[in-house]
Image: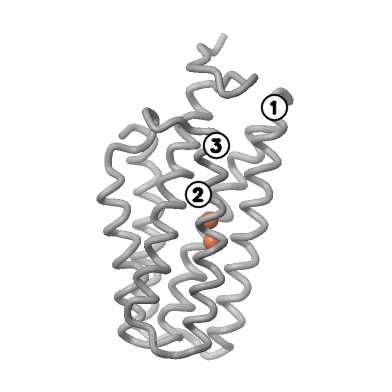
């Protein structure tokens, strides 16, 4: 029998769900910072529109996740996730739109899988149907972000440096989630 940690509205959340939500919260904080990083350096107007539009969606996700996770369960490493997010947006923005689109495509490919795991887990918690719905809505937005970024990047293959960068971004996202479950 799983020990339930605390009550959210009428809902009680198992520790595994709280740990998952901590990673979601940190991820959405990081996502907001990615687009702030992009907007600090991007000059291309199509890229700026893309970043502003995505930033608004990520801020909405952050608000929705916060409705489920009280501050005492936030990651203690939020300043690290903010800096990592900012650099993940700012660095490619210095190299141009294609680098940013490729970065977003990599990040969102990971985020889709991350939300999918939780969505599958939550199917065994019918009492958490509203949380399932929230995460599915966020996931649908992330998939749209991924596809928009892929379309904007275009059919040209990624160069060597961009491939290395995107692999680092995926690796970083995966490991941030592992750490965030605990801290
Ligand atoms: Fe998001
Ligand atoms: Fe997103």
Q: Residue furthest top?
A: 1
**Residue drawn where x is 54% and y is 33% of the image:** 68
Whole-percent x, y for residue 105 in the image: 51, 70
Compare marks 2 and 3 and give the one earlier in the sequence. 2
**Residue drawn where x is 58% and y is 47% of the image:** 115
Callout 1 crowding tier (Cα within 10 Å): few <14, some 14–19, many ≥20: few
Whole-percent x, y for residue 103 in the image: 43, 72
Q: Is residue 118 visible?
A: yes
Left or right placement of residue 82 versus residue 141 in this view: left
**Residue drawn where x is 57% and y is 84% of the image:** 152
Q: Is residue 12 above or below residue 146?
A: above
Label 2 CB sits under 8 Å from any ligand 1 atom: yes
Compare marks 2 and 1 and give the one earlier in the sequence. 2
Compare marks 1 and 3 and give the one earlier in the sequence. 3
Q: Is residue 4 above or below residue 49?
A: above
**Under tag 3, what secondary structure?**
loop
**Residue drawn where x is 35% and y is 61% of the image:** 85
Alpha carbon separation for disc pair 2 and 1: 24 Å
Alpha carbon separation for disc pair 1 and 3: 21 Å
Q: Is residue 71 above or below residue 53?
A: above
Label 3 CB sits under 8 Å from any ligand 1 atom: no
Q: Is residue 109 visible?
A: no
Residue 124's tag is 1
Of tags 2 and 1, the one toward the viewer is 2
Residue at the spot of label 2 = 62
**Under tag 2, what secondary structure?**
helix
Label 1 CB sits under 8 Å from any ligand 1 atom: no
Whole-percent x, y for residue 49 in the image: 53, 80
Residue at the spot of label 3 = 67
Callout 2 crowding tier (Cα within 10 Å): few <14, some 14–19, many ≥20: many
């Amino acid at each position: 029998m799983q020990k339930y940690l605390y009550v959210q509205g009428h809902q009680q959340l198992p520790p595994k769900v709280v740990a998952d939500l901590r990673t979601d919260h940190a991820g959405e904080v990081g996502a907001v910072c990615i687009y702030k990083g992009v907007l600090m350096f991007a000059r291309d107007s199509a890229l700026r529109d893309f970043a502003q539009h995505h930033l608004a969606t990520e801020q909405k996700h952050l608000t929705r996740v916060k409705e489920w996770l009280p501050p005492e369960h936030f990651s203690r490493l939020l300043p690290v996730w903010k800096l990592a997010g900012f650099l993940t947006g700012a660095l490619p923005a210095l190299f141009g739109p294609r680098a940013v689109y490729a970065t977003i495509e990599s990040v969102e490919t990971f985020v889709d899988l991350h939300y999918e795991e939780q969505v599958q887990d939550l199917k065994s918690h019918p009492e958490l149907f509203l949380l399932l719905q929230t995460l599915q809505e966020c996931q649908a937005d992330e998939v749209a972000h991924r596809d928009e970024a892929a379309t904007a990047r275009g059919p040209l293959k990624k160069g060597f440096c961009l491939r290395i960068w995107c692999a680092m971004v995926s690796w970083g996202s995966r490991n941030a989630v592992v750490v965030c479950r605990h801290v």
